[in-house]
Amino acid sequence: MHDDFTGPAGSPPDAGRWLTRTGRPFGAGVETHADDSAHVALDGAGRLTMTATRDAAGGFTAAWLESRREDLLPPSGGALRIQARVRTAPGPGLDCALWAWGNPMRHPEPGEAELDRWFRAGEMDVFEVLGSQPDRVHGSLHSPACDQLPSCGIGGHGATVDGAPLSDGFHTYSMVWTRDPDTVTWHIDARPYLKLTPEDTTPEGWLFNQPAHLCLAIIIGSPGGPVPPGTPDPAAFPAGMLIDEITVAVRGPKDATDAAGEAAR
C-alpha cells in the first residue's frame, strides 16, 4: 500500500484507498469531523492537507481518514512496516496521529459497545505528536491488559535531535510490526526509540495478531492520548497537517530481519 497524494489541488484523497469519517468517531476529542475540501484535500504538490478549524461559536472541526485496506498483518515469521512522512500541525490542544486498529472496530459483534470493540481490537499508534510536547513523538500499544498510560496503553517517546518542534518540518515516522517473534518497533527519522513485545503487555494483552486498518486524524482536546494535549488556543486555528506519503510494506519470513534495518535507513 502506497499513496504519494498526487492529484489536482483541492481534490479529495483517493477514494479507492481512503474512507473519510464524519461526525464523532470513537476516540474523537471535542471536534467534529467533516468531509470537505476545507478540512481534507490534496494540495496539488503531492501532499495531503488535513486542517483543523474553529468557528465563531467556538466549535472545532477536523478531518479523519481510514484506509479501505483492512488486511494489514505481517505473515508468520515476517514483518510489516508502516511509514509516513509528515509535517504535523502546531498548537496546544492538538493531537496529530496515525494508528492501526484491529478490525473489530470496523466489524463489531451485534450490539457490541464501542469500548468493548476497542478492547478486542487493540490499537497500535504509529505516531502521536501533541501540542503540549511539540518536540516529542509518542508510540504506543493499547489493550485492556496495559495500564502504564491513562488510556489502557504502554509506550514511549522519541524526539527531535535539536529540540525543535516537529511541526517545523517534515519527519519520517515508522513502525515495524513482526510476528513469530512478536515485536513492534518505532522509529523517527531512521532512529529507533521504542520496542515492545508480549513480555511488556503480558501475553493476554498482546492483541496484535489480527488484521488491521489505518486511521489518520487530527484530534483536539482529547484526554485519551499518552499525555494531555493541552487546552486548544483559538489563535492556533486554522492548523494544518501535511502528509507527503504513506507506505505499508510487507516482508516474508526469509527477509523479515531486514525490515527494521530498512526502516532505519
Image: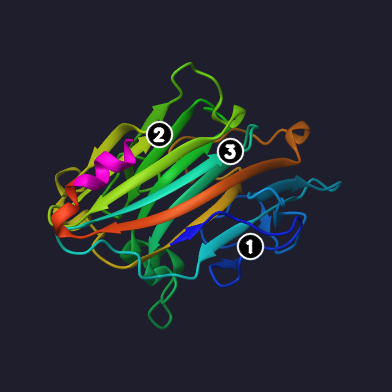
Front position in the image: 51 or 173: 173
Q: Which badge, 3 or 1, comes first in the chain's sequence? A: 1
Residue at figure coordinates x 66%, y 50% from the top left: 50
Inspect this view and state whether residue 234 appears. yes
The answer for how far apart the CA atoms under marks 3 and 1 are is: 18 Å
Front position in the image: 173 or 250: 250
**In the image, which is nearer the foreground, mark 3 or mark 1?**
1
CB atoms at circles 3 and 1 under 8 Å apart? no
Q: Based on the picture, tell me whether residue 260 belongs to the magenta stretch.
A: yes
Residue 65 sits above or below residue 236 on the image: below
Residue 240 falls in image quadrant: top right
Residue 135 sits above or below residue 24 on the image: above
Q: Which residues are magenta?
A: 258-265
CB atoms at circles 3 and 2 under 8 Å apart? no
Point out which mark residue 88 bears: 3
Point out which mark residue 13 bears: 1
Asked which secondary structure carries label 1, the reply is: loop
Amino acid at dot 1? Pro
Q: Main secondary structure of the magenta part?
A: helix
How many marks the image carries: the answer is 3
Q: Which badge, 2 or 1, comes first in the chain's sequence? A: 1
Quarter of the rendering occupied by the N terminus: bottom left
